[in-house]
Image (cartoon, rainbow, N blue to C red):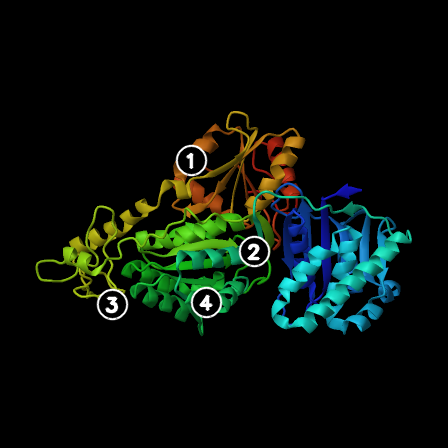
């Protein structure tokens, strides 16, 4: 029997509270002092289909789930059919006793823990409480203290009224007691248990979409204009929920074109602005992104990638939009593309994205994906005491006078050594200027004079130098450069699996150094060149078929990372995928060819 190390999966039809079950158990495990990761899987359907959620909990920090489960909560027979193969030896299947005759177990080494669900629901008040009853049974199966779940339920349903809270608590207690009786009768043997452990640091359990939303509020966002698009939609929901308390204008726009143009107007008015979308939405925003580049308006765009092209697989993950984000919008203009790898990193980089956008007065794109957007994770509570809002060159009334030319015109696009020019809000005395989509002189008036065009193009390009090196520098983990047998490179959510794979590789006798790329633009060219040239061998992992970051690194540095391992079935890498890929890359010094998801060019 293992203590405080477990994996749990809940599955069933959409609409039966699958994710609520997982979230209640995940939060209870989190409050027990464990590090928890939870991943949701759901089809692209308006109604119906099979949903599942897998939790992993450990006493040490973890970042990803594994493709195994110790406890399976089956709301229907299909869940057993789909997930029984993932059960560990003597793993437990929890289900309604009336479903036993309807399931077909494929394995003899798994255990059935049945509860009289219909009797429990009669006491609780109906079918809608079945998920909480099953959560109670699962908690008993792993000896997770019931009071932790009760606290979660009281908090989660606080706005639903006392009657709903009591009904859920009844279902929980009855499910817990029924499972405990089965275990005491000797029908089921526990294989995993939980013993709450104290923790010194404060932690939170949230998704990357939540982390981004909280950071945006902390950064002072005042206009959110968004057309909801999976898997970014929960950002709009979060902002709408808090708009009155935080004094934010939240607009559910008619489409993505309206959203990006509202951002440009809000930025022109001096507000901090943001939208969230996916690849198709960013495609529609392309002309607006270019407009913001020319008018030098600071806008922040969250792009959560999903499997494309076109509609593709809307609820599956992929990293196929990197080159799109790097090049969206016609013409040459600077933009920043941030590629955070976990909720903690996303929180800080979102906060700084607003400072950067106003420093360079250009679009900033934060590129995440479905895996990050919807997965829950325990992270240390972010430190906010050192975070400072910097509005860049947004001027006061007195400062505007310093930027007037001899004719009394405000030089909104003044040529400066840094490339950043002064900004004025509409209505400020002496701050009147033109901001349009046309090339312009320093005051904003349209021009096609070659010399003025060159001045403005070069001025805009200089602004990227304002991004601090410490923000976009490589994040390095694992072995030292001198000790490493291999250099692993990744970006975005693949960081999660790589971090968990490092100790697994060490058990295999491989010392790995990991370089995570937090910004695609500006890219830490010097850092990458130094790491790749000094590595015995290097391998990059990406969830796209063409190796888009590999292409980008080659274009920026002239170096082709020798080994490329891709996954493009809509699922994220798991730690063992990383281990297998690294081991294969060390066996071959030419192009790698291993497993179903490897691209051999």
* Mark closer to the observer (4, 3): 4
Contact between labelled residues 3 and 4, with CB atoms less than 8 Å apart: no
Residue 84, position in %: x, y?
A: 79, 54
Residue named by callout 2: 207
Residue named by callout 3: 426
* C-alpha span from label 1 to label 2: 30 Å
* C-alpha span from label 3 to label 2: 37 Å
Near mark 1 (Cα within 10 A), the count class, few <14, some 14-19 or many ≥20, is some
* C-alpha span from label 3 to label 1: 42 Å
Residue named by callout 4: 245
- The first of marks 3 and 2 along the sequence is 2
Near mark 2 (Cα within 10 A), the count class, few <14, some 14-19 or many ≥20, is many
- The first of marks 4 and 3 along the sequence is 4
Q: In which quadrant will I find the N terminus?
A: top right
Judging from the image, what secondary structure is the residue with disc 1 in?
A: helix
Residue 197, position in %: x, y?
A: 68, 44
Q: Is 508 displayed left or right of 258 in the figure?
A: right
Q: In which quadrant will I find the C terminus?
A: top right
Q: Is 158 displayed left or right of 7 in the figure?
A: left
- The first of marks 3 and 1 along the sequence is 3
Which residue is at a point 62% across and 39% down the rendered structure image? 501
Residue 277, position in %: x, y?
A: 48, 63
Residue positioned most to the top: 482
Judging from the image, what secondary structure is the residue with disc 4 in?
A: helix
Above or below, 510 against 102 in this view is above
Inspect this view and state whether residue 546 appears: no
Judging from the image, what secondary structure is the residue with disc 2 in?
A: strand
Which residue is at a point 83% across and 70% down the rendered structure image? 118
Above or below, 476 against 82 in this view is above
* C-alpha span from label 4 to label 2: 21 Å
């Amino acid at each position: 029997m293992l203590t405080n190390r477990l994996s749990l999966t809940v599955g069933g039809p959409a609409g039966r509270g699958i994710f609520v079950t997982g979230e209640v158990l995940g939060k209870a495990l989190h409050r027990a002092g464990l590090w928890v990761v939870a991943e949701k899987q759901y089809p692209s359907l308006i109604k119906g289909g099979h949903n599942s959620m897998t939790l992993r909990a450990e006493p040490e920090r973890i970042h990803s789930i594994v493709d195994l489960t110790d406890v399976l909560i089956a709301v229907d027979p299909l869940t057993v059919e789909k997930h029984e193969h993932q059960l560990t030896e003597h793993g437990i299947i929890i289900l309604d006793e009336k479903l036993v005759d309807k399931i077909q177990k494929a394995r003899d080494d798994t255990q059935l823990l049945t509860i009289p669900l219909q009797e429990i629901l009669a006491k609780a008040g109906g079918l809608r409480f079945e998920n909480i009853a099953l959560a109670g049974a699962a908690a008993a199966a792993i000896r997770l203290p019931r009071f932790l779940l009760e606290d979660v339920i009281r908090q989660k349903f606080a706005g639903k009224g006392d009657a709903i809270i009591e009904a859920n608590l009844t279902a929980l207690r009855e499910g817990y007691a029924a499972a405990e009786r089965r275990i005491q009768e000797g029908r089921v043997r526990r294989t995993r248990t939980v013993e709450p452990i104290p923790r010194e640091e404060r932690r939170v359990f949230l998704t990357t979409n939540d982390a981004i939303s909280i950071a945006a509020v902390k950064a002072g966002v005042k206009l959110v204009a968004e057309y909801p698009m999976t898997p970014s939609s929960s950002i709009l929901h979060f902002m709408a929920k808090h708009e009155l308390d935080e004094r934010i204008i939240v607009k559910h726009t008619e489409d993505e074109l309206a959203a990006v143009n509202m951002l440009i107007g809000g930025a022109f008015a001096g507000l901090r602005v943001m939208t969230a979308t996916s690849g198709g939405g960013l495609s529609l925003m392309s002309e607006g992104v270019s407009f913001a580049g020319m008018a030098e308006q600071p806008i922040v765009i969250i792009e959560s990638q999903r499997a494309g092209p076109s509609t593709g697989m809307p609820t599956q993950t992929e990293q196929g939009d990197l080159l799109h984000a790097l090049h969206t919008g016609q013409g040459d203009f600077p933009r920043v593309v941030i590629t955070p790898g976990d909720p903690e990193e996303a929180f800080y980089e979102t906060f700084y994205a607003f400072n950067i956008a106003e420093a360079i007065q250009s679009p900033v794109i934060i590129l995440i994906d479905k895996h990050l957007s919807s997965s829950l994770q325990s992270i240390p509570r972010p430190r906010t005491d050192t975070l400072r809002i910097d509005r860049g060159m947004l001027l006061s009334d007195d400062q505007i006078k310093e930027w007037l030319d001899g004719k009394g015109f405000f030089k909104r696009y003044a040529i400066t050594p840094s490339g950043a020019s002064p900004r004025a809000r509409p209505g400020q005395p002496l701050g009147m200027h033109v901001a349009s989509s046309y090339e312009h002189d320093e005051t904003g008036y349209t021009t096609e004079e070659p010399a003025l065009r060159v001045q403005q193009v070069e001025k805009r390009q200089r602004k990227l130098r304002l991004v601090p090196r410490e923000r976009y520098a490589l994040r390095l983990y694992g072995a030292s450069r001198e000790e490493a047998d291999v250099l692993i490179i990744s970006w975005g959510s693949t960081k999660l699996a790589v971090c968990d794979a490092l100790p697994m590789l060490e058990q295999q006798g491989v010392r790995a150094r990991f370089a995570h790329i937090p910004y695609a633009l500006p890219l830490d060219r010097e850092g990458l060149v130094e790491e790749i040239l000094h590595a015995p061998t290097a391998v990059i992992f990406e969830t796209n078929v063409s190796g888009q970051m590999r292409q980008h690194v080659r274009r920026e540095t002239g170096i082709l990372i020798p080994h490329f391992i891709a996954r493009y079935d809509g699922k994220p890498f798991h730690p063992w995928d990383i281990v297998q890929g690294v081991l294969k890359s060390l066996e071959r010094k030419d192009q790698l060819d291993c497993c179903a998801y490897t691209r051999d060019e």
